[in-house]
Amino acid sequence: MFSFFKKKPPAQPAPAAPEAIAPTPPPAAEEPSRAGWLQRLHQGLRKTGSSIAQVFTGTQIDDALYEELEAALLMADAGVKATQYLLDDLKRRVKEAKATDPQAVRALLVDALTELLRPLEKQLTLTDAPPTVMMVVGVNGAGKTTSIGKLTRHLAEGDQKVLLAAADTFRAAAREQLSIWADRAHVEIVSQEGADPAAVTFDAINAGRARGCDVVIADTAGRLPTQLHLMEELKKIKRVIGKAQETAPHEVLLVVDGNTGQ
């Protein structure tokens, strides 16, 4: 006899539940360095100074001392030309002073370095007919606005009334950054969104004169000398400053990168 009913297949066992896999913990974040930039700067300068100072720990003044000094100066980024000049000048000073002690050579090196850098020394003199107008220029990212903040703080602590001109209307957030520096130094700022840089500087000088300010500092946008249209804009700002106040700008401060090579 035929059966019209199919046999049910045997029940399959329920699949076992997959084992739970514990999630892999994320890698621990590296602990940020606690040393601030100022501490790292001190460490770098201390390392450079100690490497030069170690040259004079010997007991003789010979060729080995000058060779070690040459290597130390080059490692300190003194430059080949400046290093050779210092070595020749130092040997002349040692011969004239008839020095026999390496520590005396160290003192003569300090004198040589001081004499070499003295022509570059220039005091920041304020005009007798305020406000003294300073124009800060430089390439992109050289630190113009930050340098203005430091200079403003220095002048303000010297009881000078400072007014800042936000003439960098090109870079994003340039006005806001300068405003923060103005707040920190407790000085006033002239800022106009989307305005012509020369017009901002002109208004700032007039405002500084009306408010009895001692110094007006104009921040300008960074630019390269190959960008001719921006260089023409810089010339325009300088011309307008001269129209706002005769003999101004009294100082044009060029901010450059400290890592610029020899």
Image: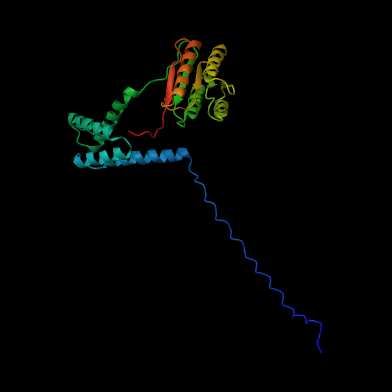
Which quarter of the figure is the C terminus placed in?
A: top left
Residue 38 visible in rendering: yes
Residue 131: where, in percent of width, then height? 50, 14
The answer to whether 10 is drawn above or below residue 242 in the figure is below
Which quarter of the figure is the N terminus placed in?
A: bottom right
The answer to whether 177 is drawn above or below residue 198 in the figure is below
Q: Residue at x 50, y 21 (%)?
A: 218
Residue 227: where, in percent of width, then height? 44, 26
Q: Quadrant of residue 81?
A: top left
Residue 56 visible in rendering: no
Identify the residue at the far bottom of this view. Answer: 1
Q: Residue at x 42, y 38 (%)?
A: 41
145 vs 131, nearest the viewer: 145
76 vs 160, nearest the viewer: 76
13 vs 30, nearest the viewer: 13
Q: Residue at x 27, y 35 (%)?
A: 80
Residue 229: where, in percent of width, then height? 46, 23
Residue 133: where, in percent of width, then height? 48, 16
Q: Residue at x 22, y 39 (%)?
A: 66
Identify the residue at the far front of this view. Answer: 2
The answer to whether 202 is drawn above or below residue 149 in the figure is above
Which color scheme did the rendering employ for the protein?
A: rainbow
* 189 lies left or right of 13: left
